[in-house]
Image (spheres, grey):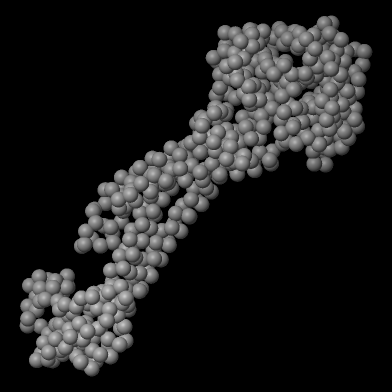
């Protein structure tokens, strides 16, 4: 309850107790710089976390609902096996759509590796069928058995083999992003605690003078807490703003850029970094309060 | 008001004060004398509870000091005005704010008591120095400002530790005059000093009791004082 009262007093500025703390000093600049740097990093960690979250969602949703049937057969049998495979797919429960990829689409798939002028008609490239599943999904084992019977050159690939590691990697990256945010908060708390302790030690004369005239520990602690919380808030505002500007300046997301150009915020997510300064201020409040009371208790 | 009963104070294995018994009655004036390092400041710090006795019983305003919480001690200090030799000001604040500091920490509004602050500054002859910061003041001005700050809460007890240590004889007499005036207003005064001339000058104006610290103990001074 007293902590809540402290926060309210801090926000309302009802007391000017922090005037008793000398206004300048190395620890003041250290606190502002630390908060700014940590807020800047926090904005990036948040962007990374949100981008990987979007990536994991996209991969797991989009890829989970698509599959491919690849037909590798002698030249004279490709068309017949393609037709047979399409017929199997047409009668398979869980298949929403099955369509063969055109030459242009297959060329586009190979273009990143072989360039735009690939003579696809002279190469033995497997025929491909793109399969879109319904929400119920396909019985992959049953489908593979039927394809083996009707079109022996057809191979059903539901992307599981490479989709799962990608989604897992994206999820881990997201977890790392969140862990980074926690580490940044802890590092901020540690640095501000050290800065506050240094300030308390450097202002031993101020504390002695305040005690001499009957100041309670609460009064002295509040003076330091208020000063350091406001400094941390100012630093974090500046750091967050710079972080937002840096992210806004990244190249815009496009298909060719992939993940890196997708690092950023989308829509209302741009408001999330605004939470960073008050969180840094709260961390600073708790850290300074802890440091101040501990140090005051240790001195007579 | 303040009662020492067989109080001892040790720092580590060093006994700084032994078997001290002292009673400060309301309205009394005491001098505490003795050579440097004898324990005068230690005894004053025990009075305003910056130090706690190692043994014996010390009552301040009727309460045993070791039974007080930290907040109790802070609140009790508001009833005691302390003048330190080095004054202990906040150097970044102007004189008026330094003088008002006891009011501020007690939750009183200095603006509402601006008249009292002005009067007090006039009483110690610093009315023209209101906006100056402590480093801009001379030694004598700082001592007078410290005295003004010590009495702004209208304390019942005034403790002064070598209040004339850094000033010339003329300023010493002026400070002494202020202390005597406060005693005549009913304040209990305890002044630690090694300046015997100051004590002699005071005794011609006020019935002061002189205590001497020697051999870690407290004794009533001889007739020469």
In the depicted view, which residue is nearer to us: A272 or A224?
A: A272
Q: Is residue A260 left or right of residue A120?
A: right
Instruction: Say if A170 sits above or below B141 in the image.
Output: below
- Give how far across and how far down residue A105 sits, in percent: 13, 73
In the figure, residue A196 lies in which quadrant?
Answer: top right
Q: Is residue A195 visible to us here?
A: no
User: Which residue is at 62% across, 33% downward?
Assistant: A220
In the depicted view, which residue is nearer to us: A215 or A86?
A: A86
- Give how far across and how far down residue B43 sits, in percent: 81, 27
Q: Is residue A15 left or right of residue B32?
A: left
In the figure, residue B29 lies in which quadrant?
Answer: top right
Instruction: Say if B129 sits above or below A105 in the image.
Output: above
User: Which residue is at 72% across, 22% downward?
Assistant: B82
Instruction: Say if B128 sits above or below A92 in the image.
Output: above
In the figure, residue A61 lies in which quadrant?
Answer: bottom left
Q: Is residue B112 left or right of residue A29?
A: right
For the N terminus of chain A, the quadrant is top right
């Amino acid at each position: 309850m007293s902590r809540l009262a402290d926060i309210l007093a801090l926000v309302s500025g009802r007391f000017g107790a922090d005037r008793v703390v000398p206004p300048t000093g190395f620890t003041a600049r250290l606190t502002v710089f630390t908060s700014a740097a940590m807020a800047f990093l926090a904005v990036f960690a948040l962007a990374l976390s949100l981008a990987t979250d979007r990536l994991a969602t996209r991969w797991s949703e989009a890829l989970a609902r698509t599959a491919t049937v690849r037909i590798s057969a002698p030249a004279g049998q490709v068309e017949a096996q393609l037709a047979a495979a399409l017929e199997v797919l047409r009668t398979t429960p869980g298949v929403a759509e099955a369509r063969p990829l055109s030459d242009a689409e297959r060329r586009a798939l190979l273009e990143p590796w072989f360039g735009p002028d690939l003579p696809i008609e002279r190469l033995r490239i497997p025929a491909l069928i793109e399969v879109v599943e319904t929400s119920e999904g396909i019985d992959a084992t049953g489908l593979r058995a039927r394809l083996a019977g009707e079109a022996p050159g057809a191979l059903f690939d539901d992307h599981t083999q490479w989709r799962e590691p990608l989604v897992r990697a994206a999820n881990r990256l997201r977890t790392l992003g969140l862990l980074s945010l926690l580490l940044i908060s802890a590092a901020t708390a540690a640095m501000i605690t050290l800065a506050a302790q240094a300030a308390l030690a450097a202002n031993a004369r101020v504390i002695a003078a305040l005690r001499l005239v009957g100041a309670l520990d609460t009064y002295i602690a509040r003076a330091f807490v208020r000063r350091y919380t406001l400094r941390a808030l100012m630093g974090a505002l500046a750091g967050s703003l710079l972080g937002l500007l840096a992210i806004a300046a990244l190249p815009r997301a496009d298909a060719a850029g992939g993940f890196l150009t997708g690092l950023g915020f989308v829509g209302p997510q741009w408001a999330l970094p605004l939470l960073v300064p008050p969180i840094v201020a709260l961390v600073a409040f708790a850290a300074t309060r802890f440091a101040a009371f501990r140090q005051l208790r240790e001195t007579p | 008001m303040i009662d020492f009963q067989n109080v001892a104070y040790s720092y580590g294995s060093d006994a700084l004060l032994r078997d001290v018994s002292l009673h400060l009655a309301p309205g009394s004036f005491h001098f505490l004398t003795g050579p440097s390092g004898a324990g005068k400041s230690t005894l004053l710090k025990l009075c305003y509870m910056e130090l706690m006795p190692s043994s014996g019983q010390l009552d301040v305003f009727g309460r045993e000091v070791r039974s007080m919480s930290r907040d109790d001690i802070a609140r009790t200090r508001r009833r005691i005005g302390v003048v330190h030799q080095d004054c202990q000001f906040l150097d970044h604040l102007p004189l008026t704010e330094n003088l008002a500091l006891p009011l501020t920490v007690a939750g009183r509004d200095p603006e509402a008591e601006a008249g009292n602050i002005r009067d007090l500054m006039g009483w110690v002859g610093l009315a023209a120095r209101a906006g100056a910061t402590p480093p801009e003041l001379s030694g004598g001005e700082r001592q007078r400002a410290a005295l003004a700050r010590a009495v702004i809460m209208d304390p019942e007890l005034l403790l002064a530790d070598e209040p004339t240590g850094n000033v010339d004889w003329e300023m010493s007499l002026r400070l002494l005059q202020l202390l005597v005036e406060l005693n005549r207003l009913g304040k209990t005064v305890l002044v630690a000093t090694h300046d015997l001339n100051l004590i002699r000058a005071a005794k011609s104006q006020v019935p002061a009791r002189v205590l001497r610290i020697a051999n870690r103990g407290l004794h009533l001074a001889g007739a020469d004082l």
